Image (cartoon, helix red, strand yellow):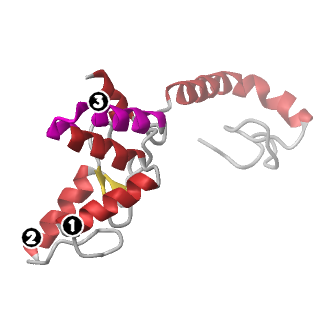
Amino acid sequence: ADTLSCASCGIAQVCDLVKYCSDACLKEHISQHKEACKKRAAELHDELLFKQPESSNLGDCAICCLPMPLDSNIMLICCGKVICNGCNHAKKMSEEEASLDPSCPICQEPAPTTKDLEKFMMKRIKMNDPIAIRHEGIEQSRKGDYQSAFKNFTKAAELGNLDAHYQLAA
């Protein structure tokens, strides 16, 4: 167990398992502590070696603060925030249960119309938002304009969007 005082006389610190107030106390107690110290050092090494990253390169969901999944996420056009599918689904379910009109879970703006969506999307593209650029590439690809789609995917990939890299490879 972690203690905050010297294992021998009850005062200071050196190891993270036991604390010593002086070299004399350390020398007096080290033979009793050596095995536990080796074990703790191995545990710390394993913790550092196998620690998972705190978030993905996609960042964290703006609502639940969990790392964004690599396969899917939702960009909120009105405020430009990105949330995970789970938070988006939860928001939709709560709106349905309460019979509310759809709104942004971050800025609370009403859900944009199709015309507003196009304006917001063009604004995000002009700001070099890689998610918006990739989305535009997907739309161009659906329309059969593969050359424009390729340009959009390439630009989004250059801006660091992994999904755009995938679209270029597929």
What's the residue at 15%, 69% (across, down)?
94
Q: Is residue 81 visible?
A: no
| Quarter of the image where the C terminus is located | top left
The Cα atoms of the two marked residues, 3 and 1, are separated by 26 Å
22 in relation to 168, above or below: below
Could you tell me the amino acid type at mark 1?
Lys
What's the residue at 18%, 57% (across, down)?
89
Q: Is residue 2 visible?
A: yes
Q: Is residue 148 magenta?
A: yes
- Secondary structure of residue under mark 1: helix
Could you tell me the amino acid type at mark 3?
Gln
Residue that carries the numbered disc 2 in the rendered image? 96
Residue range highlighted in magenta: 141-158
Q: Along the polypeptide, which appears first: circle 3 or circle 2?
A: 2
Foreground pick, 163 / 114: 114
- Secondary structure of residue under mark 2: helix
**Magenta portion: prevailing SS class:** helix
Of the two numbered discs 2 and 1 in the rendering, the one whose residue sits closer to the viewer: 1
Q: Report crowding for label 1: few under 14, some 14 to 19, many 20 or more residues within 10 A (C-alpha).
A: few
Residue that carries the numbered disc 1 in the rendered image? 115
- Secondary structure of residue under mark 3: helix
145 in relation to 116, above or below: above
Residues at badges 3 and 1 in contact (C-beta under 8 Å)?
A: no
Measuring from the top left, give residue 149's x and y in whole percent: 28, 36
